[in-house]
Structures are given as structure tokens and as C-alpha cells.
Amino acid sequence: AGVPCHPAGVQPSQLTVDPPWMTVLLREEVTLTCRGAGMPGPTEWYINKQFWRKTESDHVHVSQYQPGSSSYQCRRPRAGLSPPLTLKFSNDWLVLQVPAQALLEGDTLLLRCRG
């Protein structure tokens, strides 16, 4: 159980979330998509560094009914484990949502306020 080791030089899988927000409202469904080396086959999914499930698809839908944070990772065939992507599920009455991807100086930042 837990996160597997991978040989040096293996390219990591890439994990994205749609909609692209780091903070999500409770019961809101988001789609996690895992991209790898382009090889067909199952995708391994991890939550908080523990194996969660294996799917034939490169995406899963997640939602939470209790407030809290979870860190997600994935691995496609012949690719390494993705960097962790942490989502916070909030029951606050007003949430400022920011993108989950890394930003560089000069990038345009899209914010969304939800209540």
C-alpha cells in the first residue's frame, strides 16, 4: 500500500482538475484527468499518498460531503507518479476560488467568488 517508487528518468504523469479551482464547494463535483506517456492502459489513483483505485479511464469524478483537504496523485502506464494536487472542500458561505495550476510572474490570474 502507499505510493510506489519509480526508476530515475521516468517522466511523471500530469494531473489536472476541471473546473480548475483549488478550493471547491462541498458536494461540487470536479473531474481529475491524468496524462502520461501516451500508452494505453489503466490509471492508478492515490489519495493522501495511499492507493485509492485503478480505472480504465484517464479521468475520475470526485466530490466531498465533509469539509477538508485531500491530496490527489495519479500514474499512467510507463509514466511516473504525478506531483500531488491538493483540493480543499469548503462549506464556507463565501469562497474565493483560485486556479490549481502554478503561476509565473506576469501570468493572468483568474479569480472566482462563489457563495
Image: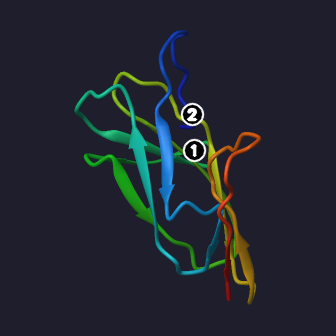
Q: Position of residue 18 (x, y in %)?
A: 47, 61
Query: Which quarter of the rendered picture does the C terminus lie within?
Result: bottom right
Find residue 31 and report its image quarter: bottom left
Q: Residue at point 36% right, 21% down?
A: 78
Find residue 114 and report its image quarter: bottom right
Q: Distance between the residues labelled 1 and 2?
A: 6 Å
Element under label 1? strand
- Earlier in the chain: of badge 1 and badge 2, it is 2
Element under label 2? loop
Q: Position of residue 30 (x, y in %)?
A: 47, 67
Task: Give the left or right position of residue 104, taking residue 16 as reference.
Answer: right
Mark identifier at residue 3: 2
Answer few, some or many: residues within 10 Å of disc 2's Cα (few below 14, many 20 plus, some between 14 and 19): some
What amino acid is labelled 2 in the image? Val
Mark identifier at residue 110: none
- What's the image's color scheme? rainbow
Mark identifier at residue 50: 1
Answer few, some or many: residues within 10 Å of disc 1's Cα (few below 14, many 20 plus, some between 14 and 19): some
Q: Do the residues labelled 1 and 2 touch (CB within 8 Å)?
A: yes
